[in-house]
Amino acid sequence: DSGVTQTPKHLITATGQRVTLRCSPRSGDLSVYWYQQSLDQGLQFLIQYYNGEERAKGNILERFSAQQFPDLHSELNLSSLELGDSALYFCASRRTSNTGELFFGEGSRLTVL
Amino acid sequence: AQSVTQPDIHITVSEGASLELRCNYSYGATPYLFWYVQSPGQGLQLLLKYFSGDTLVQGIKGFEAEFKRSQSSFNLRKPSVHWSDAAEYFCAVGEGNAGKSTFGDGTTLTVKP
C-alpha cells in the first residue's frame, strides 16, 4: 500500500460527459502529480500541484483541468469526453525533498463508450 | 527536454535465468533515475533509485541497476528471475526539487516456467 488513494477505481461513461477523479496523497506529501496511461501513449505526465498551486503542466488537454485543495487532496476533471480519453489515470505524490521518487495510487480506469 | 528510451518492448526469460532491462536517458543535468514495476491492475512501485554516489544501486526484490554516465544508461538487472517478477517495468528520469518524472514506454517481462 503506497498510501495514495484514488477514487473511483473504475468508471464507465459516454462521450460528451464529464467526470471527476479524486486523489488523496500520502500523509505529509505536498506535491500531487497526475499521469495518464494508455496503450498507445504510454505513461504521460499531465499536471503537478504543490501545496495548492499549479507547479508544472505536461500534455494536458484543454478539456481537462485539475486542482489541489487546502487539505492537499486533488481532483482531475475531464470534460467533453471522447473515446480516446479512455485510459488509466494515476495520481502520485511526493514530499518536498530531493529523494525524488513518486508514490503511485492504484489508478482510476476510465472507459468512454 | 528530458526523455527516456526503453528499447525492448517485451522480454521473455526462463525462471532462474538472469535478466537485464535496458534504459537510456537524455537529461541536461545530473539525472535522478528510477526503476518502477507495475503488476497487472496495480499502480507503479519503486524498485530502486539513483541520485549520486555509488553507480551500482541495490533495490527491492533482488534487483540492481548500474548508472553509466558515459553511455547515458541505467540498466536494471537481476541474477535469477522468479515467476513473480512477471510485470511491466518502467525506467524514469526525474527533476530534483519535487519536479516531474518522465517515464519510458515500459518493458513487459514474461517469465517462462
Image (tube, rainbow, N blue to C red):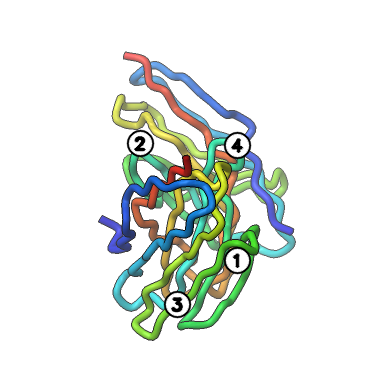
Is any atom of residue B59 visible in this view?
A: no
Q: Residue at coordinates 64% horizontally, 32% vertically from top-left?
A: B7
Residue bearing the label numbered 4: A40
Q: What residue type is labelled 2?
A: Pro
Q: Do the residues labelled 4 and 1 touch (CB within 8 Å)?
A: no
Residue at mark 4 to residue at mark 3: CA–CA distance: 28 Å
Numbered badge on residue B5: none
Residue bearing the label numbered 1: B95
Dot in front, 2 or 1: 2
Q: Residue at coordinates 46% horizontally, 74% vertically from top-left?
A: A31
Q: Residue at coordinates 38% horizontally, 21% vertically from top-left?
A: B111
4 or 3: tag closer to the N-terminus: 4
A31, B22: nearer the viewer: A31
Q: Which amino acid does label 1 sit on?
A: Glu
- Residue under mark 2: which chain is it in? B
Residue bearing the label numbered 2: B40
SS class of the residue under badge 1? loop
Instruction: Report x, y in % for residue A109.
Output: 40, 46
Numbered badge on residue A68: 3
Q: What is the count of numbered marks? A: 4
Residue at mark 3 to residue at mark 1: CA–CA distance: 21 Å
Instruction: Report x, y in % for residue B69.
Output: 68, 51
